[in-house]
Amino acid sequence: MGGRLLVVDDDLHLQGFFEDWLARRGFAVQLAGSLDALDILEHAPFEAVLAEVDLGWGDGIDLCRQIAACAPGTPVVLVGQAPDFDAAVAALRAGAFDYLLRPLDLEQLELTLRRAVRHHAVNAAVERLPSTTPRRCCQLIGDSPPMHQLYDLIARVAPTDVSVLITGETGTGKELVAAAIHHCSRRSALPFVELDCAAMPEQLLESELFGHVRGAFTDAKSSHTGLLVHAQGGTVFLDEIGDMPAGLQPKLLRVLQQRMVRPVGSTSAVPVDVRVVAATHRDLEHEVRRGQFRHDLFFRINVVQLHLPPLRERGEDILLLAQSFVRELGAEADKNIHGLSPEAAESLLAYPWPGNVRELRNCMERAVALTRHVLITRADLPQRLQEHRRPTPVPTPAGGPMLPTMEEVEQQHISRVLERVGGNKTLAARILGFDRKTLYRKLGRYGIGQLP
């Protein structure tokens, strides 16, 4: 649906035209004359108002002022005669969302009304933001359907001891899900130990995970207890397990099967009782098919899989998270910042967030540092957010379903190819028929992935 519109016009023929034309484009339309428009607005909510400047029984600009008083936040689109510069200025000063000139370009009118409806939705979302941001499952924040599904799965899997694989894009907060599982489990009073499998070379990773005895290798001047033993009774979180070197995968599998750890250079094994929670941004099933990840280890760690949705699929959670970061960072900086302006909120919702929650926090940290206001404004956001515009869908001539633009089609195709090749940009460029420079330029333009 396009949204609920109130069309104000004293010309019955124009009323009928707008009712039929807008209804065929998915809008829910109610008609009103200039004398009863305010009364209707006081008793029913609308997402936008379309009104003539020259009404038979009233003045559209004056009506716009009255709507701003009785139904604040409802965008008003005024239609006036061309050319009338003074009327256009007066309309915008009265609070009109936009001012269109006759003869009307109907495609422009439709797109303007859709923008007005979206603007109303953003304003309503900002108004709904709670005074204190709700927190669920420890540090996880979100009220979207995908997050509610995730909360339910965490609550069901946490009391068990099964291995869990957390999947999702980089920056979505997989470590917070792992911590939530641990803190909701019977092991919560015991250690929660994290290890990034992509952050160190194979020999050092092996030592950190399994430990070593003195003299096991050149720099082993003393014995070292591995994280699996250190976490005895608790939970070990293996982040980015898809990047674990092939030589270590069978050794980890042996530990998970036998519940025994043999430190590097030792002849004896140590019993361990730990729960393993792993995470990856890679498609491990694809990596198994490529021979880059052991299938038996994959089945061992993937007893239950939890998928963390990307931020762009979480709707108004973006605003919940942003407001939480603003308040937290504002308090740290000793700044009295109340939240987000509607314009800033609209920019946040339009941006695709390739860096997910991590990128959002970074942007809010910058905004808090630079702002001089009690609300974060669009001008406080990074340039890439200010310049980004949500692609505008194009209606079919007959008022059928909205068609994607070529930019949307290209963006979706590039994303799918990158996902299928595991993020390998060289291979993706070859499949797409681009050189690497062109692919990088398009990735930056569409906000897809992270450039190396």
Image (cartoon, rainbow, N blue to C red):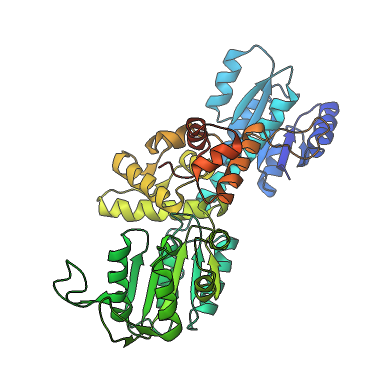
State whether residue 220 is above or below residue 256: above
Instruction: Kindly indicate the quadrant of the structure image that contains residue 306.
Output: bottom right
Instruction: Kindly indicate the quadrant of the structure image that contains residue 2.
Output: top right
Estimate the x, y position of residue 366 in percent, counting from the top left.
33, 43
Estimate the x, y position of residue 191 in percent, counting from the top left.
32, 79
Q: Residue furthest top?
A: 83
Q: Nearer the viewer, residue 38 or 316?
A: 316
Q: Is residue 23 left or right of residue 312?
A: right
Estimate the x, y position of residue 280 in percent, counting from the top left.
47, 61
For image coordinates 29% across by 43% down, the residue present is 369
Q: Is residue 70 visible?
A: no
State whether residue 46 is above or below residue 13: below
Q: Quadrant of the C terminus?
A: top left
For image coordinates 72% across by 17% down, the residue present is 102
Instruction: Kindly indicate the quadrant of the structure image that contains residue 18.
Output: top right
Q: Is residue 185 visible?
A: yes
Estimate the x, y position of residue 375 in percent, counting from the top left.
39, 43
Q: Nearer the viewer, residue 417 or 39?
A: 417
Q: Quadrant of the N terminus?
A: top right
Counting every numbered tag in the picture gives 0
For image coordinates 64% across by 34% down, the residue present is 392
Q: Is residue 280 left or right of residue 362?
A: right
